[in-house]
Amino acid sequence: MVAASLVPDAFYWAKSSKHFDGRITIVQVSTVFGEDPAYWTLALVGTDQHAMPADFEIIASAELADGYPLRQAAE
């Protein structure tokens, strides 16, 4: 899946040799740096870091189970 087919704010299963020791993880498409897809990054869930979409192999979309809303980080 290429970055152009990603959906803003959506979650995906992904893996990268540059992050998380190559283990499969969940990332979220972030528009914090701009609404244009050229500025999108992947928020590394559980951290305060962002990475470039090209750094990851997107495996599949990650859907939340019904009745289990995403818990927001404490502010």
Image (cartoon, rainbow, N blue to C red):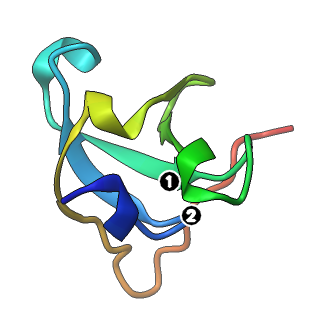
**Mark 2 in CB contact with mark 1 (< 8 angstroms):** yes
- Quadrant in which residue 69 is drawn: bottom right
Query: If the image is split into quadrants, where does the C terminus sit?
Result: top right
Q: Nearer the viewer, residue 65 or 8?
A: 8
Q: In the image, what residue occupies the spot 43% across and 31% down?
A: 52
Pointer 2 residue: 9
Task: Tell me where residue 61 appears, x and y as whole percent.
Answer: 26, 67
Mark 1 secondary-structure assignment: strand
Amino acid type of the residue tagged 2 in the rendering: Asp
Q: In the image, what residue occupies the spot 25% across and 13% down?
A: 18
Mark 2 secondary-structure assignment: loop
Task: Give the spatial CA distance, label 2 vs label 1.
Answer: 5 Å
Dot 1, how many residues are within 10 Å of its Cα: few (below 14), some (14-19), or many (20+)? Answer: many
Amino acid type of the residue tagged 1 in the rendering: Val
Pointer 1 residue: 29
- Quadrant in which residue 53 is drawn: top left
Marks 2 and 1, the one that precedes in the sequence: 2
Q: Nearer the viewer, residue 12 or 73?
A: 12
- Quadrant in which residue 32 is drawn: top right
When the figure is inspected, residue 18 is found, relative to residue 32, above or below; the finding is above
Dot 2, how many residues are within 10 Å of its Cα: few (below 14), some (14-19), or many (20+)? Answer: some
Q: Nearer the viewer, residue 68 or 22?
A: 22
